[in-house]
Image (cartoon, rainbow, N blue to C red):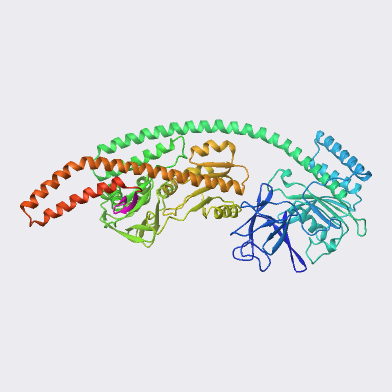
Amino acid sequence: MAYLSWQEGSRLRRERLDGARILGSDPQRATLNGPEGSAAVVAMIQPEGGRWRIRALEGGVLRREGAMAPAEGFLLDDGDLLTAGAWEFRFNEAFPGLDGERFWETANPIPLPSGIAAAAALRWTAGQAQRLEQGLLAQEDPSALSHRIIEEARSFLGAETGAFVALGAGQMKVVHQAGPPFPLEGAAALLAAHAMRDGVSLLSNDALRDPRLPASPRSPSCGPVLVAPLDPEDQGQDEAPLTAFVLIRALGAPPFGATDLGLLRSAADLAALAHRLSLVQRRLLTQAGLESQVLHLQKELERQDERQGRLLAALGGAIMRGQALARRLEGPTAKAMHLHFSTLRHLVEEGQSTDPGLPPPAGRARALSDIQSEFLESWAPLAESLNLRFEEASAPAGSVWIGGGPLLEALHSLVDPLLLQLDAGTAIPMRWREEPGHHSLDLLLPPNAGRVIPDAWSRDALVSAGLDWRWSDGCLSLIFHVLPSREGDGPPRALLGLVTEDLALSSLFQGVGDAGDLGLFPLEETPPAAPLPAFEVVVLDAKGIRDPIACLRTYRAHPSFATTPMLVVRAKEMDGPELLSSGATDWMAGALRWESLHHRLQSLRRHRELQRKGRAAERLDTVRQMAGTLKHEINNPLAVISLQTELLQRKFPDEPKLGKIAEQVQRIQGLMQVLQKMREPGDEEYPGGTNILKL
């Protein structure tokens, strides 16, 4: 675990780095506060590929050993001295401020010095490796091998107590011990917990004065301590408890040295190797059993799919016959039956689809009056058969976005059960309400009408179409979200959308966004309802999403993200082609690096700008061609109208209507000239939900 340290008066202050941090003196913006007098926001430090990178923020000046930091910052090495204005601090890969003799720790391999002692240590290590090999060939339990290693290490290094300890769920337990009992409280246990959490090997020859321990309590004390953790990745489970070897000498015994710690580190590596090899053997046996089960399940699924296909085909045939019979009947009940048969047929066809993950058809803008007419036409057959009457309201002007897919079929599951509850002759008043961001169509129901909860398929279809609903005091409200306005004082704010459940990535992308003048906007796996702000780029984290392919398709089907560049990060190499075919603009595999993300996002933004300019040029060319064609076709009729108007004005000079005709002819000619000379056509909204050219 890495640390930053600096002097505050006579005290050395240490800060442990457990993730990305923003350095500065402002407690509202910085997550690691420096000394008074430092800048509000100084720099950002974050992990990158097993190392740490630091870069200046807000135009700050950052130096390492006197050298100015580039825009992308520095990859830090152990012991680097950094300055930011008056703030001088040091980066360490282990606990800083240790003297190297009484107290020492390291996350790196420990080389053994030359000499007689080193030769004896090498002989002991080689003997342990040979006995480990023999034990593995004899298929001994890896726990027994670890127990034997810690016992022999205790004897060889002259320790009083040897223990193999585990730390999980905040509690420490002794897996195996040699000699007197290992104390689960006190200095040795605290040092073991520190070593396991930070992943460092350590020695402490004076536990009462060890700076890694809290000032109090430091009792019961102990003699010299060695701790060597086992790599958690070597234990085969992401959530496995942390483990370590611990040796403790008696009070007053000679101190441990670096060679002793190197030997214990070698013993821990041998134990980790035993765990790895044992887990490989178990996995091979488990994999063989799983492969057999997978083959059995695949065959069972194939049989079930075949049976389901036959049943759906038979059901589809029966529905088609019922639909044909309903067409021969007369009256509103027959029409209602026909509509429900159509819904059943749609469900059967969707059940027979070979790719249920396909996105729904693209949506479009619809006038509110058209939506109301379509809804009433769909509800009318059942209402007439039940002798019910809708009191139609006057729809307001405006448009809303309606997604593609079976909206009317899904809406029947919400409205039809309501109609079936009402008494014959009941009138159902309708009203429109306009609220910020949406329009609401209310169905006012009598008090005896109970609430209806649509089935899961209908709920998904309604949400996909952009339609929400709400119950309140005998009223069913159908909520339509308005289209985002294109007017404003300037261009929409550029946003960087991030879809992930891994909150640790937020700080990394916050920094990348700041460098590219993009605001970070967290998004869920399901796109939010319209209206939405303008997004410059959307990033999907493949490791932070349950189903990246389905999420990508859902976003690409949403109208607000139909043309937005989509970058998928931390993806698997094998998924690249499928990601591109599902709508991804680009993808990145492997670990995330700040400079790679920054350059990739800038490339996507340049690509989008070129596409926008290309579309604008193509559109302008189309407008000019249309203007030339119209001018050619309209000139002759305009010339005739203009000439005849001039003759009539000479004959009837006091007729004002002739002057208005002449003015309109000149206006048409002027519009043709404007269209042909247009350089960059713009849009403006027009009543009815359409856009027209702004001349």
- Which residue occupies the foreground of this view, 133 or 620? 620
Q: Is residue 547 above or below residue 100?
A: above
Can residue 362 be seen?
A: no
Q: Is residue 273 above or below residue 52?
A: above
Q: Is residue 26 magenta?
A: no
Relative horizontal placement of residue 554, taking residue 342 as reference (left or right): right
- Which residue occupies the foreground of this view, 609 or 568? 609
- Number of dots carrying numbers: 0
Can residue 195 be seen?
A: yes
Q: Is residue 361 above or below residue 249?
A: above
Relative horizontal placement of residue 442, taking residue 647 as reference (left or right): right
Residue closest to the far right = 116
Residue occupying the point 42% across, 38% down: 350
Residue 73 percent coordinates (x, y): 64, 52
Q: Is residue 677 above or below residue 16?
A: above
Residue 53 percent coordinates (x, y): 66, 52
Relative horizontal placement of residue 326, taking residue 350 as reference (left or right): left
Residue closest to the far left = 651
The magenta segment: 681-694
Residue occupying the point 45% across, 53% down: 534
Residue 470 percent coordinates (x, y): 40, 57
Residue occupying the point 86% across, 56% down: 101
- Which residue occupies the foreground of this view, 363 or 576? 576
Provide the major secondary structure of the magenta segment: strand
Residue 533 percent coordinates (x, y): 44, 54
- Which residue occupies the foreground of this view, 651 or 170? 651
- For residue 440, which quarter of the picture? bottom left
Q: Is residue 684 magenta?
A: yes
